[in-house]
Amino acid sequence: MKIPGKVMRFVTWSQEDPRAVSFIARLLHCVFGIRNGLPGRKGFLLIFTGASGDMVSLSPAIRELARQRPDTPVSIMVKGSGTGSILKACPYVDQIVEFCLYEDTPCKWWQLLKPLWRIVWRRRYATAVLTMGTGWAPQYRIWALLLLYATGARRRLAFRDECAPWWNAGDPVHRLPLANEIIEASQPQRTDRFMELFQKAGLLTEAEHATTEVWTSEDDVREVAQLDECFARRGDDRPIVLVFPGVGSGPGKRWPPGRYVKVVSHLIATYNAHVFLDGMSRDHPLCKTIAALVSCKNLAGRHSIGALFALIKLADLVIASDSGPIHIAAATETPAVAIFGPTDPRIWAPKSPCLTILRTSDCPPCGNPYFCQRGIDFVCTTHVAVSDVMQACQHSLRIWNPQCR
């Protein structure tokens, strides 16, 4: 059975036989709790279950934790999908371990404990913090809370609104102190929310600056130079535009592909731009279809996540929906046009003066990118007009437009 099926089966089992789940959770907590109770090196363990954009939003908290507590090691456990690659060049994290709980790959049930064994048994942690993001549906969060409990850390922190699956579980599981310090969230924006979690827990004082950041290596820069010659010479009079037509979790976040064709054609005709379509491997067919209609190149699935950071840093403009590339653009101070739909920009959009947010005002944000509550195919996204995107691009690329110079 594949991993998501195992998790759903576990959720069902926890409801049918919560006493057995309670026994296993207590056993793991005792094993790792004894280890953490021994004298020795102490540190912070972050259990992160979000996607790439959430990781970028978490970067100020990680940076401040390392700056204000330089003698305390920081480790992070992340879910799969290459999220750990985002931190490979990060100077603030001592150890990174990926767990494949949400991956669509075959795995033995006992292999789910390997990441926990690697990161907890080799080191001892006084504090474990659960930082959830968009990557997990509510039915999976009970597993994340049990993972937090199994670390055996004396302090186990989590937001109150992310502990709802624990309260709704069967009585034996409900009685487990999965998180022994519950933090009330008052900040809606993701970066501020993560900082608030650490500050209210007493782990951080007031931050000097809460700007996000990403990290690249020399290998990432070399990889980008090999993708196309324009990245290597980067000195001509043509702007570089990165377009991400397929990114975003859920169909409600994705702007119609035909409109991207019109925008790309406009950028090439007006600015003589180098336009590159990008995204994950699963976005390659869509990007290939768009690239066949306009004169641009398809980079989807052809590079690493670190190379994506370097690509966006080199670009003059990024166009995407509410997704990771928008957060990376904000962190690298690259001008970006973000097309928002069912998600609320006040919560999910990064703070950046270089970001232009487009969203229709006819439909209030519902936060559900998978099901249109009005039953009319996500008008919040489809009502964003091509002309609006073109105007936003003109504002960001005005130095490249001869008529605007």
Image (cartoon, rainbow, N blue to C red):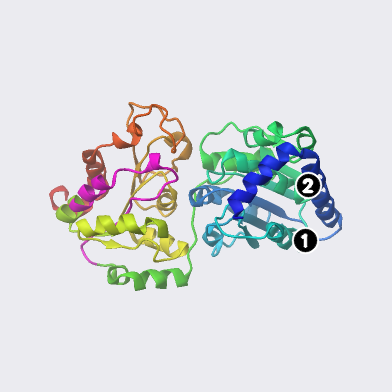
Asked whether, in this view, residue 146 is left or right of residue 90, the answer is: right
Q: Is residue 154 visible?
A: no
Q: Residues within 10 Å of mark 2 (few under 14, many from 20)?
A: some
Residue labelled with disc 1: 121
Asked whether, in this view, residue 370 is left or right of residue 180, the answer is: left
Mark 1 or mark 2: which comes first in sequence? Answer: 2
Marks 1 and 2 in Cβ contact (< 8 Å): no
Q: Position of residue 239 (x, y in %)?
A: 25, 59
Q: Is residue 255 magenta?
A: yes
Q: Position of residue 262 (x, y in %)?
A: 20, 48
Q: Which residues are magenta?
A: 236-265
| Residue furthest out toward the left | 403
Residue labelled with disc 2: 25
User: Helix, strand or loop at disc 1?
Assistant: helix
Q: Nearer the viewer, residue 225 or 165?
A: 165
Q: Is residue 332 magenta?
A: no
On-image quarter of the N terminus = bottom right
User: Helix, strand or loop at disc 2?
Assistant: helix
Of labels 1 and 2, the one closer to you: 2
The residue at 77%/61% (across/down) is: 121
Residue 404's place in the image compared with 379, above or below, is below
Q: Residues within 10 Å of mark 1 (few under 14, many from 20)?
A: some
Q: What amino acid type is highlighted by mark number 2?
A: Ala
Q: What amino acid type is highlighted by mark number 1?
A: Trp
Residue 282's place in the image compared with 381, above or below, is below
